[in-house]
Image (cartoon, rainbow, N blue to C red):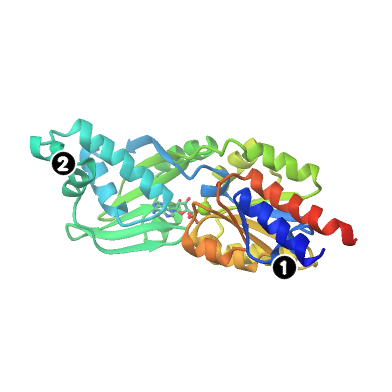
């Protein structure tokens, strides 16, 4: 391809909301054999909503949600946002808000309602921990709890398994070393996800899914999309290793992701493709940015590269 052809293709991409960072990236896309998709926020809308709240102790719903939301308030994770949105709704409609706080916006009313969380830390691929009223609270997956010495009773485990078999994520909450309850969160697939997976297969490209989420949820999601090869319970650093394992035999691999935890994998891939609505660090690490957040543009990107470079073969 001539420099002019590359310039034209880059322009066509840009006009269609596909930003391409340079001619090399444009050229590599034609050779892609595997497209590895992150799950949350990439194949799914990343707009998780709370669908279940189950409390396994005597604690009332308001107190439970108040603790939980206070712990998640400093997290940027889509799951945390879902919990905050749910708590905001609960707090606004079900607590006796004063006239004053109703006059204010929703946001400030919620922050007044929340407890102060001290010593907050986000544990990638696990959840969050902090201290509220002098006691530790843990909010996250099984590993987060077990690694902190908290056993998961059978009834809780059964409830979580049930959520996961329905493609939901179960978030466990422990306070002061006691398992309080579980929140079920659903994150719908992007409308175009299944069509894109099918389209890639037709182009001879193998779609793969990689996620930090648990195996059961991952399998349920992959089944809906007809993706055969998946990797679940992958730690952020592990996503780049997954990319490298596919590259070992010289295969050309694209990674599509949106999160902070996807950036090492986006950098390791031959073609890193970031979702425009994703984290800044993911966008920086990528070769392509999909400004419309539409997965169909993954196909457009590969097509554009194939068309631009086919003449010289
Ligand atoms: P993905 O790879 O699908 O984008 P992540 O690596 O971000 O997922 O998260 C993996 C898992 O860690 C989540 O499915 C969840 O169980 C847990 N987790 C991470 N952050 C949080 C949080 N802020 N609150 C609750 N759970 C969390
Ligand atoms: Mg993600």
* Residue 104, picture quadrant: top left
Name the residue furthest left. Answer: 99
Residue linked to disc 2 = 104
Above or below, 178 relative to 92: below
Residue 10, given in percent of the width and then of the height, sits at 68, 58
Residue 126, given in percent of the width and then of the height, sits at 44, 57
Residue linked to disc 1 = 24
Front-most of 212 and 161? 212
Left or right, residue 141 beside residue 8: left
The secondary element bearing badge 2 is classed as loop
- Dot 2, crowdedness within 10 Å: few (<14), some or many (≥20)? few
Calculate the distance from the C-alpha at mark 1 to the C-alpha at mark 2.
52 Å
Name which of mark 1 and mark 2 comes first in the sequence.
Answer: 1
Residue at position x 61%, y 43% in the image: 219
Residue 36 shows in this picture: no
Left or right, residue 238 beside residue 84: right
Name the residue furthest top. Answer: 93
């Amino acid at each position: 391809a001539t420099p002019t052809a590359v310039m034209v293709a880059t322009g066509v991409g840009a006009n269609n909301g596909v930003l391409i960072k340079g001619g090399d990236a444009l050229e590599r896309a034609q050779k892609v054999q595997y497209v590895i998709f992150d799950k949350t926020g990439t194949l799914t809308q990343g707009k998780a909503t709370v669908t279940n709240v189950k409390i396994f102790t005597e604690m009332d719903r308001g107190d439970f949600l108040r603790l939980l939301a206070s712990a998640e308030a400093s997290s940027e994770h889509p799951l945390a946002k879902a919990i905050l949105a749910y708590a905001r709704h609960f707090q606004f409609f079900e607590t006796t808000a004063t006239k004053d706080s109703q006059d204010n916006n929703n946001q400030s009313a919620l922050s007044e309602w929340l407890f102060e969380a001290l010593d907050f830390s986000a544990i990638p691929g696990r959840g969050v921990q902090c201290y509220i009223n002098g006691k530790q609270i843990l909010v996250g997956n099984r590993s987060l709890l077990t690694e902190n010495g908290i056993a998961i009773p059978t009834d809780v485990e059964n409830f979580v398994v049930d959520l996961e078999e329905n493609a939901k994520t179960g978030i466990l909450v422990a306070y002061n070393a006691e398992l309080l309850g579980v929140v079920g969160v659903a994150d719908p697939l992007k409308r175009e996800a299944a069509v894109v997976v099918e389209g890639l297969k037709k182009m001879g490209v193998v779609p793969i899914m990689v996620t930090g989420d648990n195996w059961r949820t991952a399998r349920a999601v992959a089944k809906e999309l007809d993706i055969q090869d998946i990797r679940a319970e992958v730690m952020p650093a592990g996503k780049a290793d997954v990319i490298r394992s596919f590259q070992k035999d010289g295969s050309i691999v694209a990674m599509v992701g949106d999160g902070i935890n996807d950036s090492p994998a986006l950098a390791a891939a031959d073609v890193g493709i970031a979702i425009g609505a994703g984290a800044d660090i993911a966008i920086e690490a990528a070769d392509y940015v999909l400004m419309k957040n539409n997965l169909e543009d993954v196909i457009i990107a590969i097509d554009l590269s194939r068309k631009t470079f086919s003449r010289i073969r």
